[in-house]
Image: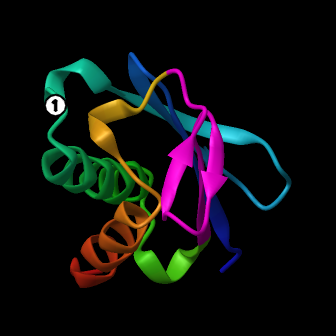
């Protein structure tokens, strides 16, 4: 089976997700309201992992059908501090290191 990609755009008011087929076309979309998480990054990370899982499942895909997940966030990465700097919006206080927690959360879910 061909591999698909999920793109995630994290913004200050919402998170947009798109499922992209091997030809590069967006075949499904979903979104989350960022403000619903009241700067609770643990809840947002869990919700992101759940939204990715749901987007794949709703389109008949399992984890093995995904090539990867790309995440875009506003601002600049400061690898020394493990954070985003010069960022006007930081949804739920997510830091660069939080993405490791996100990856572990997603990987721990059943396929």
Q: Give the image location of residue 83, x and y in percent.
A: 48, 55
Determine the residue located farthest toward the front in the rendered image.
Answer: 80
Q: Give the image location of residue 110, x and y in percent.
A: 22, 81
Point 35% across, 62% down: residue: 98
Q: Which residue is more in the foreground, 18 or 71?
A: 71
Residue 77 left/right relative to 83: right
When the figure is inspected, residue 31 is found, relative to residue 61, above or below; the finding is: above
Q: Identify the secondary structure beneath mark 1.
A: helix
Q: Which residue is more in the foreground, 48 or 63?
A: 48
Q: What stretch is highlighted in magenta?
A: 68-88
- Residue 108 sits inside the magenta stretch: no
Q: Which quarter of the rendered picture does the N terminus lie within?
A: bottom right
Point 40% across, 48% down: residue: 55
Q: Which residue is more in the foreground, 3 or 1?
A: 3
Q: Give the image location of residue 32, x and y in percent.
A: 32, 28
Q: Which quarter of the rendered picture does the C terminus lie within?
A: bottom left
Q: Which residue is more in the foreground, 101 or 90?
A: 90
Name which quarter of the figure residue 2 lies in: bottom right
Circle 1 residue: 37
Q: Give the image location of residue 81, x and y in percent.
A: 50, 63
Point 58% across, 69% down: residue: 80
Neighbours of disc 1 within 10 Å: few (<14), some (14-19), many (20+): some
């Amino acid at each position: 089976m061909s591999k698909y990609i999920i793109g995630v755009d994290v913004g200050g008011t919402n998170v947009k997700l798109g499922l992209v087929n091997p030809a590069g076309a967006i075949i499904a979309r979903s979104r989350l309201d960022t403000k619903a998480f009241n700067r609770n990054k643990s809840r947002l990370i869990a919700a992101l992992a759940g939204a990715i899982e749901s987007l794949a499942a709703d389109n008949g895909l399992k984890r093995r059908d995904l090539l990867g997940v790309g995440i875009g966030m506003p601002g600049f990465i400061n690898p020394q501090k493990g954070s985003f700097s010069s960022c006007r919006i930081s949804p739920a206080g997510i830091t660069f290191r939080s993405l490791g927690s996100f990856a572990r959360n997603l990987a721990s879910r059943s396929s």
